[in-house]
Image (cartoon, grey):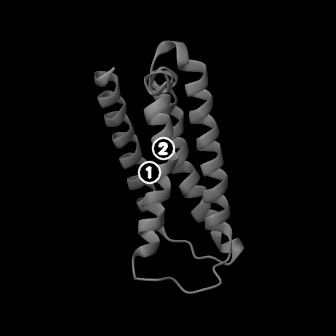
Amino acid sequence: MKKAVMTSIQKTLLHRSGRPARHKIALVVTTLLTVFITYATLTPMATPQGLPGSDKTYHVLAFVALTFPCAVLYPRTLILVFPGAIAFGGLIEIIQPYFGREREMADLYADAVGASIGVGAGLCLRSILKKLM
């Protein structure tokens, strides 16, 4: 039973026969993360930030999470997802002042770094998983 479940998961995630499910998972997760990031970055902050620079860490982590699913599960979309993620970060910075937040170029740089790390880590993991199959 356990082996059958693992084989099913592997097939869904990387095998050709699991492609439609894999693509759907990648796109749904990426869409949900986009909604969450939009909400988190455009909601006025009620409390002051924690440690100095922690805001940049949150930007990096958010954009790692944003690009990682497509890099692992549907890498063909990276031609749109990667530049789209960076443009999304730029759009957020442009409109944040209208939501009581500050515009910072450093946040956009952190978004780009995070998107790059997410793509790199996702492609590495995909390569490792394919070798294990």
On screen, 37 above or below 85? below
Q: Position of residue 53 (x, y in %)?
A: 39, 76
Q: On the picture, is 98 further left or further right than 107? A: right
Spatial separation of the CA atoms under disc 2 and disc 1 = 6 Å
Question: Of the residues shown, which amino acid type is indicated by label 1?
Answer: Val
Residue at the limit of the structure toward the front, as seen here: 1
- Image quadrant occupied by the C terminus: top left
Q: Residue at x 50, y 42 (%)?
A: 83
x and y percentages locating residue 16 in the rendered image: 49, 13
Residue under label 2: 67
Residue closest to the eye, 82 or 51: 51
Q: With 104 as the anchor, is 114 left or right in this view?
A: left
User: Horizontally, is 55 left or right of 36 in the view?
Assistant: left
Residue at the right extreme? 98
Disc 1 secondary structure class? helix
Mark 1 crowd level (few <14, some 14–19, many ≥20, 10 Å Cα): many
Q: Nearer the viewer, residue 59 or 65?
A: 65
State the residue at coordinates (50%, 57%). 62
Residue 87 on image: x %, y %: 55, 49
Quadrant hosting residue 98: bottom right
Q: Are marks 2 and 1 in contact (CB under 8 Å)?
A: yes
Determine crowd level at label 2: few under 14, some 14-19, many 20+ residues with C-alpha closer than 10 A: many
x then y, percent, for residue 56: 43, 69
Q: Callout 2, which amino acid?
A: Thr
Total marks in image: 2
For mark 2, give the secondary structure: helix
- Which residue is most to the top? 17
Q: Residue furthest bottom?
A: 48
Which residue, given by chain and number where applicable, does mark 1 sit on? 64
Picture residue at 43% right of the left edge, 49% below the top:
115
Q: Does 128 appear above or below 17?
A: below
